[in-house]
Structure formats: structure tokens, C-alpha cells
Image: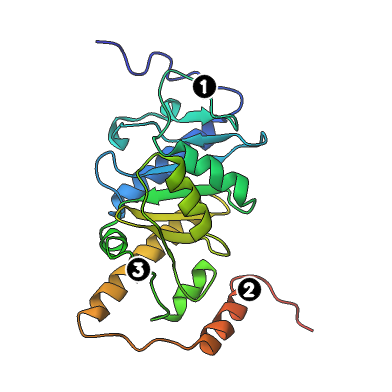
Amino acid sequence: MTDPHPDADAQPPTAPAALRTALLDTMRAMGAARLNVGTAGNASVRLAAAGDFLVTPSGMAVEACTPGDMVVVHADGHHDGALAPSSEWQLHRDLYAAYPAAGAVLHAHAPFATALACQRAAIPPFHYMIARFGGSTVRCARYATFGTQALSDAAVAALHTRNACLLANHGMLVFGRDLAHALALAIELETLCEQYWRTCQLGAPVLLSEAEMAEVIERFRWYGRPRSQG
């Protein structure tokens, strides 16, 4: 049997060892948070070289991966190393190209997000924390087969002015300024999905108005940032 890690210690210069480790740790944290099971889901982080990113490999359980298994993909689609990148590599590439603020991208088949995605409906403003993702709703991208340009196009459209969306009959997608930020957003989105699912068991929730959400969105512009004393 061929050794899946013939040169596990060799790190291409375009992907620092620390970043490879951080990406693998993020995928493991997604599993620990019950966002993914088995080989489901994927994650990536933008590299310094224009258009390049580091992404998790295709079809490998996170428990079996080493930092050296993380795959460098270039803007033109070719990749370095013996392992194939995630089947969703095109989605990651197109998100980085469309959204300069994206430093890391996470895709998960989280239970509650996926359940709602199978309803093919946006998450409405049932809770003010929906604004954390850039607007008064979390949109659901139209359905497309995984790993296709059609899915990538649908996701890029659904993320306009947002940093998270659902993928119809599929799961969730988020991006953040770095891996830690993206992971925090993914966990927060799954929590909101669970809360929405639970409140719908009691009946249709009372939604916040556009004016109320606009006020929250404005507050989130400086939330968590230092403010002047003037």
C-alpha cells in the first residue's frame, strides 16, 4: 500500500507550516463542535501570493490528516503535491476572488444549518444576531451539484453584502478575516440555526422590522472595536 504521507515534513514555501497546522486544527475544531462528521465539509485559508490558497484535501477524514496533507491551490486551478484538493476548491477560489475581505472560508454540513438549507429558505430576522452576518437575513443559495461552477456562482451571489449563507440541500458556508474568525462565525451560525429551528416548533416567530435590523446592523459596524472618547 502506498504511504499517504511520503513526505509529510516537506512544506512548500507558499504554505508556511504554521498555517498548515492552523488549517488542520480548524477542521478538527469543526468536528469537535459537531459542524462536520467524517469526510464532510472543507476549509481553506488565503495565502500571501495573489490568488493562492491552502485547502483541505479531498475525501480524507480529518483524523487521518497531517499538516502536510493540506493542499496549495493556485488561481489558475492547478495544485501542488500528490493529494487532490477538496472537491469544492473552485468554490473557495471564486470566493477569494469575489470578496477581498475573505481571509478564510469554511463549509460545513452542520445538522441544523443543513436541515434549514433543505427547506431552501432564507433565515429571517427572528433574532438580532442575524445582523452579525452582514444583513437582515442569511440567504439560501440556489441548489447546484457539489463541486461545480454552478454551485460556486450560486454561493458568490448569495454572499453579496454577507459573510455567510446556506447552500440549498447541502449545508452552510461562511468566510472570515482569518481561520479563528471564520470558525467563530460558523459556530455562531449553527447556533442561530438551531434557535430558529426550535422556535419554529412553537409557531411562526415574531420577526424584527427592517428599521430594527438597520439599527442593529449600524451598531455592528463598531461592535468589538475600540471607539474614540470624543
Residue type indicated by callout 1: Asp
Of marks 1 and 3, the one in the foreground: 3
Q: Which residue is pictured at 64% across the width and 70% down the height?
A: 225
**SS at mark 2 in the image:** loop
User: Farthest residue in the right direction?
Assistant: 230
Residue 160 appears anywhere in the view = yes
Q: Which residue is mark 3?
A: 121
Residue type indicated by callout 2: Arg
1 relative to 206, above or below: above
Nearest to the observer: residue 97 or residue 188? 97
Mark 2 and mark 3: span between their CA atoms?
26 Å
Q: Which residue is mark 2?
A: 221
Q: Could you say where residue 55 lies in the image, as x and y percent from the top left?
A: 47, 36
Q: Which residue is pictured at 43% across the width and 18% down the height?
A: 82
Residue type indicated by callout 3: Ala
Q: Earlier in the sequence, mark 2 or mark 3?
A: 3
Q: Could you say where residue 115 lies in the image, as x and y percent from the top left?
A: 25, 62
Left or right placement of residue 174 versus residue 221 in this view? left
